[in-house]
Amino acid sequence: MIDISRARFVHLRWLLQLEKLLRQESIPQLQSHKSCDLGIWLYQDGIKRYGRFPEMSFLEKRHKNFHETADLLVSLVHERNYVEAEVALDELKRNSQDLIFMLTMIEYRMAESSKTQDA
């Protein structure tokens, strides 16, 4: 099972790396939405176990979109198209907020589900 707190932290660290890219500080190593830690959990266990939670579908879509936008951001920076890269970064930040919220809601639902099973 994924540690939701760790997933939030890793996600925020990855967003920071993408912001550094825009400032020409570093280039993060991109992964697909299925091969990062969250993606592995989603597609190997999360959707099967928690697909009944409405947030899971939204999380999956936002997570995939986050990776697509991250790929676009890296391409735009390589093309030196910094205006569009800033727009992509703003979209990443919005997706990031949604992802963090969905992870928190799923964590809450997991805890509630656990209480119900223990009772």
Image: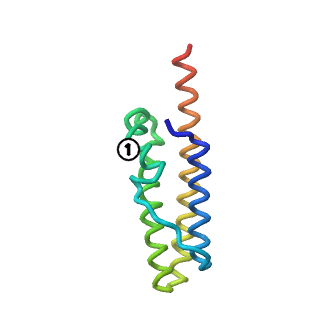
Query: Quarter holding the C terminus?
Result: top right
Indicate left or right for 97 with 44 as reference. right
Specify the farthest residue to the bottom.
80
Coloring basis for residues:
rainbow
Task: Locate residue 112, reporting x and y percent.
Answer: 57, 27
Residue depicted at 60% across the width and 70% down the height: 19
Q: Amino acid at mark 1?
A: Tyr
Q: How many marks?
A: 1
Residue depicted at 59% across the width and 66% down the height: 17
Task: Locate residue 33, reporting x and y percent.
Answer: 41, 56
Task: Locate residue 44, reporting x and y percent.
Answer: 38, 41
Quadrant in which residue 45 is drawn: top left
Quadrant in which residue 115 is drawn: top right
Task: Locate residue 75, reporting x and y percent.
Answer: 44, 77
**On the image, numbered disc 1 is attached to which residue?**
43
Vertical side of 27 occupied by 52: above or below: above
Residue depicted at 58% across the width and 74% down the height: 26
Graded by Cα atoms within 10 Å as few (under 14), some (14 to 19) or many (20 or more), the crowding at tag 1 reads: some
Vertical side of 53 occupied by 37: above or below: below
Residue depicted at 61% across the width and 57% down the height: 12
Circle 1 SS class: helix
